[in-house]
């Protein structure tokens, strides 16, 4: 193995491609799906989930636009007032000997 590492670095530039991290993640996800399955055929359900993931890989989630409605809430201390009004006082219990 020691003799092959420098050759692999020269050929591929990086050994990270061979870490098998993707395979381990796939096995972990499959195991979680298998034990959380309520159906009779858990392996088929795992294969359907993998297929769904493959189909959805080419799509990306669009970021939602956000517009602040009330600037006074953030800039004029209104958020601090609300936070301090929600603070609850707890009674300290002492044990008597």
Image (cartoon, rainbow, N blue to C red):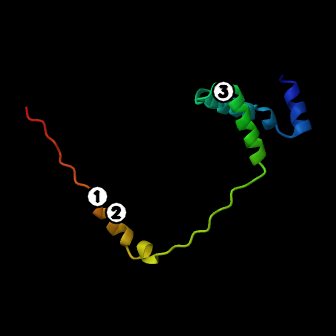
Circle 3 Cα neighbour tier, 10 Å, few/some/many (<14 / 14–19 / ≥20)? some
Residue nearest the viewer, comparing 53 with 86? 53
User: Image quadrant for the N terminus?
Assistant: top right
Marked residue nearer the N-terminal end (1 or 3): 3
> CB atoms at circles 2 and 1 under 8 Å apart?
yes
> In which quadrant of the rendered view does residue 67 lie?
bottom right
Please give left or right for residue 53 compared with residue 74 in the image: right
Q: Earlier in the sequence, mark 2 or mark 3?
A: 3
State which mark lies toward you, 1 or 3.
3
User: Mark 2 sits on what residue?
Assistant: 83
Q: Dot 3 lies on which element?
A: helix
Mark 2 burial class by Cα count in 10 Å: few <14, some 14-19, many 20+: few
- Circles 2 and 3, Cβ within 8 Å, touching? The answer is no
Q: On the image, numbered disc 1 is attached to which residue? A: 87
Relative to the observer, which residue lies in front, 8 or 65? Answer: 65
What percent of the width, then of the height, locates residue 74?
A: 44, 72
Q: Mark 3 — residue?
A: 42
């Amino acid at each position: 193995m020691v003799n092959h590492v420098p050759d692999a670095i020269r050929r591929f530039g990086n050994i990270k491609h061979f870490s098998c991290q993707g395979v381990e993640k796939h096995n972990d996800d499959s195991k979680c799906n298998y034990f959380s399955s309520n159906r009779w055929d858990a392996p088929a359900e795992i294969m359907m989930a993998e297929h769904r993931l493959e189909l959805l890989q080419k799509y990306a989630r669009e970021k939602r636009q956000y517009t602040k409605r009330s600037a006074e809430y953030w800039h004029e201390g209104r958020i601090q007032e609300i936070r301090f009004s929600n603070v609850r006082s707890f009674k300290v219990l002492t044990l008597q000997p």
